[in-house]
Amino acid sequence: MSLYQGIFKRDMQVAFKQKAELVQPLMFLLMVVTLFPLGVSPSPDTLQRIGPGVIWIAAILSSLMAMERLFRDDFQDGSLEQYMLSGMPLPAVSAVKVAAHWLVSFVPLLLLSPLLAMFLNLTVDMYIALVLTLILGTPLLSLIGAIAVGLTVGLQKGGVLLALLLIPVFIPLLIFATSAVDSAALQLPYHAQLAIIAAMLLLAAALAPFAIAYSLKVSQN
Amino acid sequence: MWKWLHPYAKTERAYQLCLTLQPWFWVGALACLSVGTVWGLAFAPQDYQQGDSFRIIYIHVPSAILSMGTYVAMAIAALVGMVWQWRTAYMSMIAMAPIGAVMTFIALFTGAAWGKPMWGAWWVWDARLTSELILLFLYMGVIALYGAFEDKQQAGKAAGVMALVGVVNIPIIHYSVEWWNTLHQGATISKFDNPSIAPEMLWPLLINLLGFAFFIGAVTTVRLRNEIVLREMHRPWVQALAMNKALNQQPGDAATASLKEGS
Amino acid sequence: MQFESFADFLNMGGYAFYVWLSFGVTFLAMGIIAIQSFSKHRDLLKQVVVEQERKARIKQARQQQQDSM
């Protein structure tokens, strides 16, 4: 158990050493959200209609930026290879790293969400739905994203390729999450959408670590 | 049960299989597509609601069905490659990807061309159209990922993982019409005992479906052979094959004649 | 034949543009990928032959060197 705690602690420490790397995706998120009132329309009604989608799209895009960090530092200093050779079960190592990455990358997003909701004129009901979808959906982004990050770690042109691979896969999540918030806007129940997102999350939590381990084996030979 | 498939793990046998199947696939494609297209364009009765524009169905439905079918075949090839470590499985996967993408493009394009006169819109964001578009992105992602790796063995494994992750999308497309109320009409030929389409219209559709399937098979055999030659260039049997082809084509060429003597 | 004349056939009941656009683009796309696949095949085999010829030339050159020594 302490080995995994060690990995977790190490990842957290490394993350906090490079505060700039943590803050930049958040600033990107904030600025992208700001673009919409400026570029589309500042009218409160319009913003409320497009708000949920804008926040989720901005979350997905900024997560693509943050995700590269997951294995990159370990790859560069050789500790990824060490993890793979150490005899520790790679799926478990991956799961721990993804958990640390989620805490560091997405919890700030959750904390920032009230500000974003205010910018886009979301109602309280919509905001509650948004937070629930973010809590259930962002771990899904981390887990599935890690599979593609595992495949492309070490590739030169990894960044855009990562986005090309992951965006199609994230689209169903985007559809269900925004559908939930839109239902909340109309005072309709949205348990169904949350249940489906939760089901996808559980499936990913069960299977993704093994897929991530396999991806690392593929890309690291 | 699948023992008969095992010899095709070797690239040489797979190459020979492609050569054997190829003429049948091309002839089948040409025959079925000509018959189906002519029948559908000129001889099938007009639809009482849609007039003659409905004839686009003879391309749209086969290409849509096969776009999904090819992706599933790709995913199966990826799975075979992953479980049994067959290089020919990964090679088949990447051989199928471009033609699958072309089928998806055709489905989307003909759907738009059919939708504009019928429902007034080139494009709507309903579940079926959206998930077919995502399918195109998935194809492009698999092809892009394969191309990003120098080592093609690695590339096959990586692209295989993405192909399997994306295969979840296929049921979503298929059932989307039932899960959401969409503009897109319901399934035409899945209800076998009570099809909602007239038989005179159904036959050319099925023939074209077969024709497109033959076409996909034919192009796949060519592309699989390409992939095999690319990966196995250093093998003597590939070199002999290439030399034979060169010699057969240019019997009077002095350079190749001297080469034959020299080797 | 569902059409009175060839002109009617081309007209497709008024939907000529959409029908012929669909069929045209479809067969064009199929043609392109078929031709590209065959062309790649020829190029690959040619590449193998070129490589073989190169190897033979190197071998010949080495042998000549050995004979002259």
Image (cartoon, grey):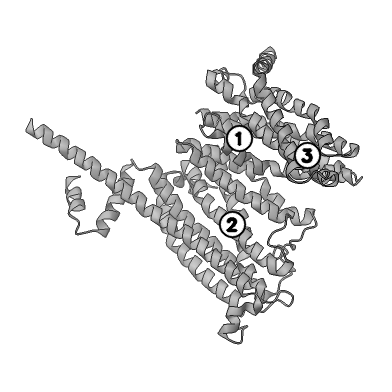
- Asked whether B117 or C42 is in front, the reply is B117
Displayed quadrant of residue A140? top right
Residue type at tag 2: Phe
Q: Which residue is mark 1?
A: A148
Residue A200 in sight: no
Task: Please tell me if label 3 and label 1 are on a single chain.
Answer: yes
Query: Between marks 3 and 2, how big is the CA–CA gap?
Result: 29 Å
**Badge 1: few (under 14), some or many (20 or more) residues near its Cα, within 10 Å?**
many
Residue type at tag 1: Ala
Left-right relation of B8 to A182: left
Residue type at tag 3: Ile
Dot 2 falls on a residue whose secondary structure is helix
Q: Chain of mark 3?
A: A
The residue lying at 62 percent from left, 38 percent from top is A163
Displayed quadrant of residue A203? top right
Specify the farthest residue to the left: C68
- Asked whether B115 or B31 is in front, the reply is B115
Q: Chain of mark 2?
A: B
Q: Which residue is mark 2?
A: B105
- Asked whether A211 or B13 is in front, the reply is A211
Q: Quadrant of the C terminus of chain B?
A: top left
Q: Which residue is mark 3?
A: A197
